[in-house]
Amino acid sequence: PTVIALLLLAGVAGKSAQFPLHTWLPDAMAGPTPVSALIHAATMVAAGVYFVARLLPVFQASTAAMVVLAVMAAVTMTGSALAALAQDDIKRVLAYSTIGQLGYMTGALAVGDRGAAVFHLLSHGAFKALLFLAAGVIIHAAGTNSLAAMSRMADLRDRVPDAYWTMTVALLALAAIPPFSGFFSKESVLGAAEHVATGHTDHAPGSAGWIVLVAGLVTAVLTAAYAMRLWLLAFRGRGAKAPDHGRQPLVMNAVLWVLAVPSLAFGGLAFRVLPDWFDGRDLTPTLTTSVLGTGLALVGGIVTYGAWRHTGALAARVPLGAVAAHPEADAGLVEAEAIASHRPAYGDIAYATDPADPGRLL
């Protein structure tokens, strides 16, 4: 059973971008944003998680396989959250976020709770698809994927009000702030890990429970931190006005509000229904993990905001100039001209870090 489970797990690691076979996923985000939202947030990468959920008894037949699954999930979720803090491309931040949330799902499976895993899979599919599509609207408006460039655009949020509000909802769901859907699904994972770690259930080894629980709580801090960083850099920039590339069409904005509904309300409705679909285990958030998870998420967000205020004051002393040279020009031409014209004074602006980026302090 151990050999069979570990060989299956190797395929799952590649399919669902789990450590150490995770490096392909950020590069795959270079495709069209709707494709990223559909395939990488909700369907393709989730197939490995679904596979383990369907074959969970095979993995439970081997204690060693469950522990390996727990270690893989723990390294994946914490490592990808740290990587997300260091990304400048807005879609690569979301790519590493996807890897980390898949780590939560495999962590739930490592403690033997397929209901919690699939609950987070469904919840994540809604708010992560919303994040990708909102990122596409922002890229369309800003003319660049770079968060460093967006942080030097003063009024970007006013140009994309629909993306601003819906992405705020999705980031709160990602950070597992109640009452958004991510809170209920992520707490079901942490609650399942706590039950195994404390010996209340015996369908997984206790060591796997502790590994997933500790890693999940650490990742809760980091997730809120990179979510706050993305929101601040994208929507609270200082500098020249954002280039005006025209109003986004209705079809781009309407789908954001469609996905905002399940991002806000899905978790509160689903945790009562899903247990009947799976193994009957309660998915109601428990007090201990709810307080710990939410408290740590708030700490991560507040610390990042404080770091941004500190670095923002320092950045005011560094005259980096505006990235958008001609707001009325073609977006690609603007970016190319900005890169060329800034190189003599500031180095290659395409690789220049933003002094106000809180990720540099964190």
Image: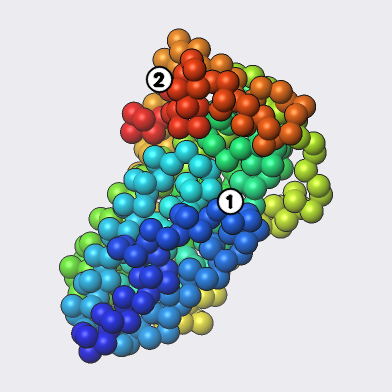
From the viewer's side, name the closer residue of 265 and 59.
59
Taking 220 as reference, is 199 above or below it? below
- Which residue is depicted at the point 69% across and 42% down? 140
From the viewer's side, name the closer residue of 128 and 300.
128
From the viewer's side, name the closer residue of 44 and 267.
44
Q: Secondary structure at mark 1?
A: helix
Circles 1 and 2, Cβ within 8 Å, touching? The answer is: no
Residue 197 visible to the viewer: yes
Taking 265 as reference, is 232 above or below it? above
Residue 68 disc label: none
Mark 2 belongs to which amino acid?
His
Extreme residue toward the top, this view: 317
Q: Residue 9: where, in percent of width, then height?
A: 31, 77
Q: Residue 164: where, in percent of width, then height?
A: 65, 39
Q: Quadrant of residue 57?
A: bottom left
- Mark 1–mark 2 Cα distance, whole angstroms, equals 27 Å
Name the residue that disc number 1 marks.
Answer: 131
Q: Residue 52: where, in percent of width, then height?
A: 38, 79
Residue 310 disc label: 2
Q: Quadrant of residue 332?
A: top right
Mark 1 belongs to which amino acid?
Leu
- Which residue is depicted at the point 54% across and 62% down? 41
Q: Please state, as top left, top right, bottom left or bottom right, where the C terminus lies in the image.
A: top left
- Which residue is depicted at the point 53% across and 48% down? 91
> Dot 1: within a 10 Å radius of its alpha carbon, few (fewer than 14), some, or many (20 or more) residues?
many
Q: Residue 197: where, in percent of width, then height?
A: 22, 66
From the viewer's side, name the closer residue of 26 and 176.
26
Q: Quadrant of residue 355?
A: top left
- Which residue is depicted at the point 57% across and 25% down? 340
Q: Secondary structure at mark 2?
A: helix
